[in-house]
Image: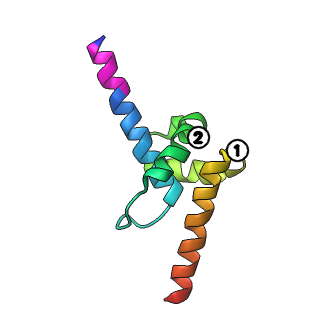
């Protein structure tokens, strides 16, 4: 049973990281928020588990399935998209 718990814990950590990366869709230099982890982990597991651990494929899957993500995750994705647009416009 200990091996099972270790596998579950590792998988959960990976999914949390993946969900954060997906939600932000930003350059690797930017920090990921705990809000994105909270809001998008369940959606990433539900919609894109077959893409794990490939972060770019998870990101593409989440964008493709944006209409099906939870309202909280969608809000985080929208905020980050708007922030990237503002940042690009300022450059």
Q: Which mark is residue 68?
A: 1
Which residue in the rendered view is the most extreme toward the left? Answer: 2
The tally of labels here is 2
Does any portion of residue 4 appear in the rendered image? yes
> What residue did someone put label 2 on?
43
Apparent side of residue 90 relative to residue 3 in the rendered image (left or right): right
60 part of magenta stretch = no
Q: Earlier in the sequence, mark 1 or mark 2?
A: 2
Q: Is residue 30 above or below residue 50?
A: below
Label 1 crowd bin: few (<14), some (14–19), many (20+), radius 10 Å: some
User: Where residue 55 sits in the image (x, y, percent)?
Assistant: 44, 50
- In the structure shown, which secondary structural element does the residue marked by tag 2 occupy? helix
Q: Is residue 84 left or right of residue 12?
A: right
Q: Is residue 60 rendered to the left or right of residue 55?
A: right
Q: Nearer the viewer, residue 9 or 61?
A: 9
- Tell me the chief SS of the magenta region: helix
- Boundaries of the magenta span: 2-8
């Amino acid at each position: 049973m200990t091996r099972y718990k270790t596998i579950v814990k590792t998988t959960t950590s990976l999914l949390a990281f993946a969900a954060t990366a997906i939600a932000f869709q930003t350059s690797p230099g930017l920090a990921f928020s705990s809000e994105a982890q909270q809001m998008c982990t369940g959606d990433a597991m539900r919609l894109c588990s077959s893409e794990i651990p490939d972060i770019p494929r998870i990101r593409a899957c989440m964008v493709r399935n944006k209409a099906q993500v939870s309202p909280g995750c969608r809000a985080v994705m929208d905020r980050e998209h708007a922030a990237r647009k503002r940042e690009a416009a300022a450059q």
